[in-house]
Image (spheres, helix red, strand yellow):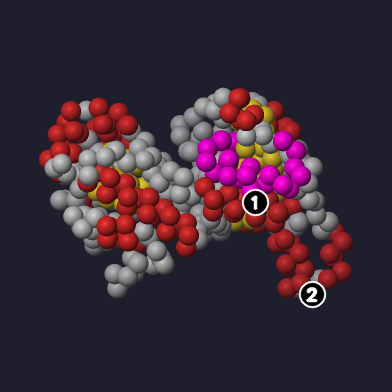
Amino acid sequence: MLTADFFDAAGRTKYEDIGLSVFSAAPHVRFSALAEHRPEIGPGQLAGANGVIVLTPKVTARSVSQARDLVAVGRFGVGYDSVDIPACTAADVAVFITAGAVDRPVAEATVGWMIALAHHVRAKDQLVRTGNWEARSRYMGRELRDRTLGLVGFGGIARQVLQLLANWGMNPPLVFDPFVDAATVAKLGGRKVELDSLLGESDFVSIHCPLTEQTRGLIGAAQLARMRPSAWLLNTARGGIVDEAALYDALKAGRLAGAALDCFAQEPVTVPPRLAELENVLFAPHCIAWTNELFRDIGRAACQGMVDLSLGKKPRGVVNPEVFEKSSFQEKWRRVCPR
């Protein structure tokens, strides 16, 4: 099954390519869409399904409470804060993400936003639109050359950012990630530091960690106060990692040069946030990296994960690997996917 938000009212996919061609090589796998889009998947929607690929709905304990035949939830992306992982494990449901499929487009979007912030692209666009040509001298930009990038989280996206910036003449990047050792960071040209040091030394602070109980509110008022007034903050990861009220205060008071936000603590955003009052903030509705290539690659990875499970193989990107150690999961898996 695929959640209904992949499709329009006529049943056509909203996107150019979501990887469904993968199923052409696996005729034993049949797929269909959920009949109705709901913010949270209902237990009845999954009746008889062996797997579900999820775009935006939440997967809760209630969602999997009747998951007799459900083997896996595949998240269309790399974030999984919308999925109750312990509940899925308890219900003998594996959860996997499309690891690696988002790295390039999110990295490109990050670099693009860095340039846009440093060169006042939004403000300069408005000067032309409002006929205010003579004000241009007030908006002198800054090059990326000789600037320092701080990466909060050092997974595939952050590493791709470094590759894209390799020839831009920037200073060696700073990395904060408790799960990556200093030698790995150094091998890729960076320097591992504590969060406070990264915030105080960076011209750009770019967030690339998942939203967990450990990272929720990671960047609050105290952390923002450590940043330089000339620095910019970018968040293409998850809302909730940054305290939006504290960010507003810092930007309003001129304690930060600007910010770019692709994600918010509460989504969807249907009323303009208070941050929208400020001219030095760039926004996107959690889609800054959306490209046809992105959806194709994520879709292929998600569909391949389902095919792998149907063939008795463990897919890439499993976030609750302990479920594979449960005899009850193994029994369900063998029953649903005989091999």
Residue 87, image x, y percentages: 28, 35
Q: Mark 2 or mark 1, which is nearer the start of the sequence?
A: 1
Residue 257 is situated, as x and y percent measured from the top left of the image, at 74, 47
In the picture, measured across the screen, residue 210 lies left or right of residue 122, that is left
Q: Name the mark on residue 131.
A: 2
Q: Please provide percent x and percent y for residue 119.
A: 76, 56
Q: Position of 92 compared to 166: left or right?
A: left
Q: Is residue 201 left or right of residue 83?
A: right
Q: Residue at x 30, y 28 (%)?
A: 322
Does any portion of residue 280 appear in the rendered image?
A: no
Q: Report helix, strand or loop for mark 2.
A: loop
The residue nearer to you, when weighing 25 against 199, is 25
Instruction: Name the residue: 76% across, 44% down.
Output: 169
Q: Amino acid at mark 2?
A: Gly
Task: Give the spatial CA distance, label 1 vs label 2.
Answer: 29 Å
Q: Nearer the viewer, residue 186 or 281?
A: 186
> Which residue lies under the disc numbered 1?
111
The residue at the point 45 percent across, 49 percent down is 101
Q: Amino acid at mark 1?
A: Val
What residue range appears in magenta?
Answer: 152-172
- Where disc 1 sits, the SS reads helix
